[in-house]
Image (cartoon, rainbow, N blue to C red):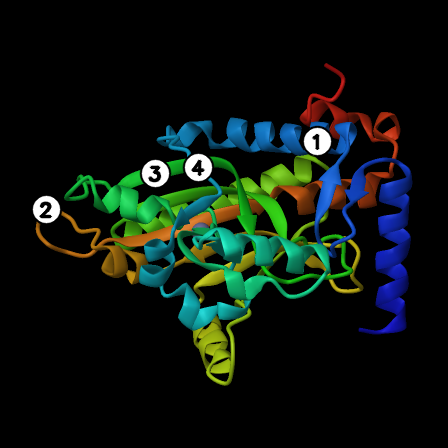
């Protein structure tokens, strides 16, 4: 990290903290959020709801933890083991419990007293939806559209960049169907997202992107993802010298359809795509673009977010 970046992160975080928008926890990338920050975040979410109404999507909701099996089946551990969050808990007897608490009390390592449970933190909001759709049986003609609402997700990537949080809300929309349906839906959402960012006065650029795949094979996977145009991002300036992704538009081909067994009546494996809006990042971008005082934001932005009501 360069000195310039550090200065940017620290100055922006300091301004957010002093105004009560973010409440630092002492752990990097983990914040409470103040009243006004939450107001904006929820209004951004409401705006996405309005823009997405035409889809008439189903609106299932999932908790921020999911079965460990879902993570294993999804292939996430092969691509992003460094980002996963797995829940461990204590299953021992009295003496071991006393030892565990004593170690923790002395600030020592107490992880050896724990064992893995059946649940993990959700790393991307769409993951729990695939086994749920597969469990219904064959996919209907025309596929399905899902609006998963604002979902807490976890990424193990502690950072000084206030825009890179460990726990944050993704607003994800998912399309499962045949290739043409899924790709057309993703294009529609790129247009809708451009409209959303224009309404709130954010200068977003759209670009091809790749994920932060782990390890030596990661670079190859990222190149292949770009070549096949699987991932696009909307980028906005927040705290880094480079613009930060605030939304992504992902075509999974038949990866999740094959992994979770989502098929049409004729046995063909379904394709899928998801669109994810990073609600905290968009909120941070708004404070960066329009200032720390909500009442001084441009009228058009206040109207688009219904902030005067
Ligand atoms: Zn997704």
Q: In the image, is 243 to the left or to the right of 263?
A: right
Q: State the residue at coordinates (74%, 37%).
A: 33
SS at mark 2 in the image: loop
**Disc 1 on helix, strand or loop?**
helix
Taking the view exactly as shown, the residue that stands out farthest to the top is 309
Horizontal and vertical percent position of residue 169: 58, 42
The residue labelled by disc 4 is 148
Residue identified by numbered label 1? 38
Instruction: Give neighbour class at mark 2: few <14, some 14-19, many 20+ (Cα, 10 Å).
Output: few
- Kindly report which numbered mark, 3 or 1, lies closer to the viewer in this rendering: 1
For this orientation, the residue located farthest to the left is: 266
Query: Where in the figure is residue 139, as x and y percent of width and height?
Result: 19, 43
Task: Determine which residue is flagged by label 3.
Answer: 145
Q: Secondary structure at mark 4?
A: strand
How far apart are labels 4 and 1 at the CA level? Answer: 19 Å
Mark 1 Cα-neighbour bin, 10 Å: few <14, some 14–19, many ≥20? some
Q: First in sequence, mark 2 or 3: give its number.
A: 3
Mark 4 or mark 2, which is nearer to you? 4
């Amino acid at each position: 990290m360069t000195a310039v970046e550090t200065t940017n992160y620290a100055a922006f975080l300091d301004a957010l903290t002093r105004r009560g928008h973010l409440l630092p926890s002492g752990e990097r990338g983990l914040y409470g959020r103040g009243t006004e920050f939450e107001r904006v975040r929820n209004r951004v979410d409401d705006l996405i709801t309005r823009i997405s109404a035409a889809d008439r999507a189903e609106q299932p909701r999932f908790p921020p933890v999911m079965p460990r099996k879902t993570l294993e089946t999804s292939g996430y551990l092969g691509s992003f083991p460094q980002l996963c969050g797995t829940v461990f808990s204590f299953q021992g007897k009295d003496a071991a419990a006393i030892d565990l608490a004593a170690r923790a009390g002395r600030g020592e390592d107490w992880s050896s007293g724990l064992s893995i449970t059946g649940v993990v933190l959700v790393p991307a909001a769409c993951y729990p939806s695939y086994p749920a759709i597969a469990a219904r049986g064959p996919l209907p003609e025309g596929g399905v559209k899902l609006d998963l609402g604002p979902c807490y997700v976890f990424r193990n990537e502690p950072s000084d960049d206030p825009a890179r949080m460990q726990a944050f809300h993704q607003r994800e929309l998912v399309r499962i169907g045949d290739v043409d349906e899924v790709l057309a839906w993703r294009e529609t959402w790129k247009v809708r997202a451009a409209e959303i960012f224009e309404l709130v006065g954010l200068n977003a650029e759209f670009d091809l992107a790749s994920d932060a795949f782990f390890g030596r094979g990661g670079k190859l996977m990222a190149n292949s993802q770009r070549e096949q145009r699987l991932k696009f991002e909307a980028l906005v300036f927040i705290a880094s010298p480079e613009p930060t992704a605030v939304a992504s538009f992902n075509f999974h081909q038949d990866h999740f359809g094959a992994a979770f067994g989502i098929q049409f009546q004729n046995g063909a494996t379904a394709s899928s795509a998801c669109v994810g809006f990073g609600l905290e990042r968009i909120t941070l971008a708004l404070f960066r673009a329009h200032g720390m005082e909500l009442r001084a934001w441009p009228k058009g932005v206040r109207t688009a977010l219904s902030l005067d009501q």
